[in-house]
Image (cartoon, rainbow, N blue to C red):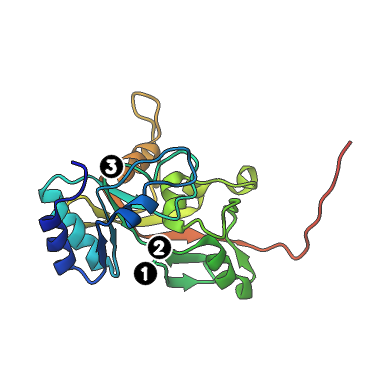
Amino acid sequence: METLDPKLAKQVQDAIEGEVYLDAYTCGRYATDASIYQVKPLAVVVPKTVRDVETTLSITQKHEVPILARGAGTSQCGQTVNRALVVDCTKYLDQVISFDPEDQRLRAQPGLVLDQLNEFLRPHGLWFPVDISTSSQATIGGMTGNNSCGARSIRYGTMRDNVVSISAILANGRRKSFGEIEKPRRDTKGTWDSDILTEKLLQIGLREAAEIEFVAKATAEGIAAVA
């Protein structure tokens, strides 16, 4: 399959508020990311609402169309390019859903950019510590899927250490919530339950929203050289 069946693309377009693209220019832009790879997608869907994502997955799943969720495309390993239907949530699904400054927790849609998130948190003296170099472009959804880390991961951990829960939309279009595991256990292969959960989640669905934790921003910053 070189491209999505135009009839199927029209069926998706008629059922959602967002946009569906099959043209060479748009597919060409989504064929690349920050990696060395280049793979033309079958089509591109830009959902306007969460319902758009549910509808898109529900329709395409019946036709066994592969789905690829995409953030800003800043990864250098090619995770955001493939011969699949690309779903890009960065244009519309980029809002803060809820915020609790006392518990230092926030729910965000997957298209929210990291710098925009920290700009939102700054008046509250808070900061999201997974400070990757592409913070002006990288999205919370993409960072979660990639388990991004950043320069301070030794101190604050990676995304998996700062994501409390995920609301996902499964391949069949249904919603599912994944939360904290109170007592992680190792299986017979020595793998943590949380590792299995993360792997399966990335295989079966797209993130609708993520609940993340923050830390208080330092009042002073400095650099020290130790001989």
Alpha carbons under labels 2 and 1: distance apart: 6 Å
Secondary structure of the residue carrying tag 1 is: loop
Instruction: Look at 47% across and 66% down and name the residue there.
Output: 106
Residue that label 1 marks: 92
Q: At which x and y percent is residue 120? A: 55, 72
Please report contact status of discs 1 and 3: CB closer than 8 Å, yes or no: no
Seen from the viewer's position, the closer of residues 33 and 207 is: 33
Placement of the N terminus among the 4 image quadrants: top left
Disc nearest the viewer among 3 and 2: 3
Q: Residue 90 got which mark?
A: 2
Instruction: Look at 42% across and 40% down and name the residue there.
Output: 78
Instruction: Look at 55% across and 45% down and name the residue there.
Output: 149
Please report contact status of discs 2 and 1: CB closer than 8 Å, yes or no: no
Alpha carbons under labels 3 and 2: distance apart: 20 Å
Secondary structure of the residue carrying tag 3 is: loop
Instruction: Look at 29% across and 65% down and name the residue there.
Output: 47
Residue that label 3 marks: 83
Q: At which x and y percent is residue 80? A: 39, 46
Would you call the spot at circle 2 few (<14 residues within 10 Å), some (14-19), or many (20 or more)? many
Secondary structure of the residue carrying tag 2 is: loop
Give the side of residue 99 with respect to residue 194, left or right. right
Would you call the spot at circle 3 few (<14 residues within 10 Å), some (14-19), or many (20 or more)? some
Placement of the C terminus among the 4 image quadrants: top right
Residue flagged by tag 1: what amino acid is it?
Tyr
Residue flagged by tag 2: what amino acid is it?
Thr
